[in-house]
Image (spheres, grey):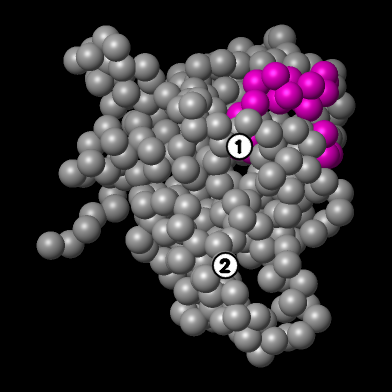
Amino acid sequence: MTYELADRLVLGVASSALFDLGESDAVFREQGEEGYRAYQERHLSDTLRPGVAFPFVRRLLSLNDLDPDDPPVEVIVLSRNDPDTGLRVMRSIAAHGLPITRAVFTQGRSPHRFVPALNMSLFLSANQDDVREAVRAGLPAGRVLGPDPSSGADNATGATGFDGLDDLDDPELRISFDFDGILATDASERVYQSGGLAGFREHELANADVPHDAGPLKDFLTAVNRIQLREEQEHQKDPSYRPRVRVSIVTARNAPAHERAVMSLKRWGVRVNDAFFLGGIDKGAIMAVLRPHLFFDDQAAHLATTARTTPSVHVPFGRLNGAD
């Protein structure tokens, strides 16, 4: 029987986002492909340490207990490894008890072109080039960042610094989004860049009843909302059931520009639990309290502070990222 992906939340995750591959990457850079292959074979039974996206992926997969016979979440590994070197990744997945059974290994080539074929609403990687190629192709992709994104490293080596986010006694899954360039396009950001804050506010007031065009991660939020609906249905059947997924937007918008953002979400048929309209206040201070398992933003400057305490994802979408 064919396994259908159409009605599931499908996440594509590179091994570099799921695990800490800093040591492996150093071997590849210093010794080349053959040295890397030999290194992975020698360490085949050594379990890889969790990476930046690991707590997020673990919690996302735990939601499959809503319907074990027809799981709402599917996570598929998309990796530049070949099948041989990918064995260590799959063994590490099993050792950590993650129910991931599907993988695509494309020796040395970016795997992002398989995102549409596998109905993925999000592809996470620590490889900057792969993510930029995916976004330029119109695909929903983000680069995971450890505590020091200013280093420019291509791999997430700082996941263990996010203390408490993988506490299994806390089953909640918290996801946070910037608004412009993430859930919406960067059209209003372009107005801000050309007309300044006054021009931006005037534009948003004049278009308050005009919903934004959907941005790169709107469909991912839609898929998350479907799971939240299933949780609500479970709570109605069993009042003791506590919904685990909580979604927020954390944006530099403030009044009066907040109104168009809220209206756009409503018109798109999506929703969030919490909204932070910060008007230029540092997002990092909010993240340290909110503690999402992933925060998505299109501007690297914002992520420079959030990534110190929060697993963060750079979505290089729009003019500011050279993705026109």
Name the residue at 66% across, 90% down: 34
User: According to the image, label 2 marks what residue?
Assistant: 46
- Which residue sits furthest bottom? 34
Query: Counting residues from the N terminus, which is met first, the one under dot 2 or under dot 1?
Result: 2
Q: Residue at x 50, y 25 (%)?
A: 170
Neighbor class of circle 2 (other Cα within 10 Å; few <14, some 14-19, many 20+) is some
The C terminus lies in which quarter of the figure? bottom right
Residue extent of the magenta highlight: 280-305
Circle on res. 294: 1
Is 164 on the left-hand or right-hand side of 301? left
Magenta run includes residue 288? yes
In this view, the residue in front, 67 or 128, is 67
Query: In the picture provided, is 131 more to the left or to the right than 278?
Result: left
**Residue 146 seen in render:** yes
Horizontal relation, residue 144 to residue 200: left or right: left
Q: Residue at x 50, y 49 (%)?
A: 122
Tag 2: amino acid: Asp
Asked if residue 21 is among those painted magenta in the image, a careful observer would answer no
Asked if residue 12 can be seen in this view, the reply is no
Q: Nearer the viewer, residue 261 or 281?
A: 281
Q: Position of residue 225 (x, y in %)?
A: 40, 29
Identify the mark at residue 14; answer none if there is no mark.
none
Towards the viewer: 158 or 189: 158
Question: Quadrant where the N terminus lies?
Answer: bottom left
Tell me the quarter of the picture where residue 128 sits: bottom right
Q: Are marks 2 and 1 in contact (CB under 8 Å)?
A: no
